[in-house]
Image: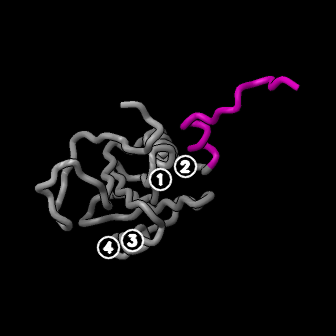
């Protein structure tokens, strides 16, 4: 049997599925990888409210030093990053800050060094670059 329609959810579809509206989120999102890091992050956020919990993703919004911020776990691999980014962008989040661990190509970097990246290379083994 041939499919009548391509199976594909857009970012708009995903955002509607979790019932997320632009007024529910901050203009900044902080994205740690796993959910346990998100829970630690939320201890630093004032009055966090859970926006949604769907599959393995959970999103909260609260304030930090008077600024409305949103936190969501994700960004652990390229498809995971794609899902969370689509939801965040379609909800109106303007600035995404990914925090966590990374690999490096520079042999002079040491474990524990702070890295502020302005571009990245995906090393997922699937993406051609």
User: What mark, if any, has residue 44 been given in the picture?
Assistant: 4
Q: CA distance from mark 2 to mark 3?
A: 19 Å
Residue density around tag 2, few if under 14, some if 14–19, many if 20 or more, within 10 Å: many
Q: Nearer the viewer, mark 4 or mark 1?
A: 4
Identified at 38% across, 56% down, the residue is 31
| Residue identified by numbered label 1 | 24
Answer whether labels 4 and 1 touch (C-beta < 8 Å): no
- Chosen colour scheme: one colour
Residue 59: x and y in percent read: 49, 59
Which region shows up in magenta? 1-17
Quadrant location of the N terminus in the rendered image: top right
Residue 13: x and y in percent read: 61, 38
| Residue identified by numbered label 3 | 42
Position of residue 109 in the picture relative to residue 6 (left or right):
left
| Residue identified by numbered label 2 | 20
Identified at 34% across, 70% down, the residue is 45
Q: Earlier in the sequence, mark 2 or mark 4?
A: 2
Identified at 43% across, 44% down, the residue is 124
Q: Nearer the viewer, mark 1 or mark 3?
A: 3
Q: Nearer the viewer, mark 2 or mark 4?
A: 4
Q: Is residue 85 visible?
A: no
């Amino acid at each position: 049997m041939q499919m009548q329609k391509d199976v594909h959810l857009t970012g708009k579809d995903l955002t509607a599925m979790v019932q997320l509206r632009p007024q529910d989120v901050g203009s900044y999102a902080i994205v740690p990888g796993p959910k346990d890091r998100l829970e630690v992050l939320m201890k630093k956020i004032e009055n966090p409210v859970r926006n949604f919990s769907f599959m393995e993703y959970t999103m909260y919004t609260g304030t930090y030093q008077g600024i409305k911020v949103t936190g969501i776990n994700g960004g652990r691999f390229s498809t995971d990053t794609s899902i969370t980014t689509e939801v965040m962008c379609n909800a109106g989040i303007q600035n995404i800050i990914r925090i966590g661990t990374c690999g490096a190509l520079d042999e002079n970097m040491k474990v524990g060094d702070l890295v502020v990246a302005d571009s990245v290379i995906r090393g997922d083994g699937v993406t051609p670059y």
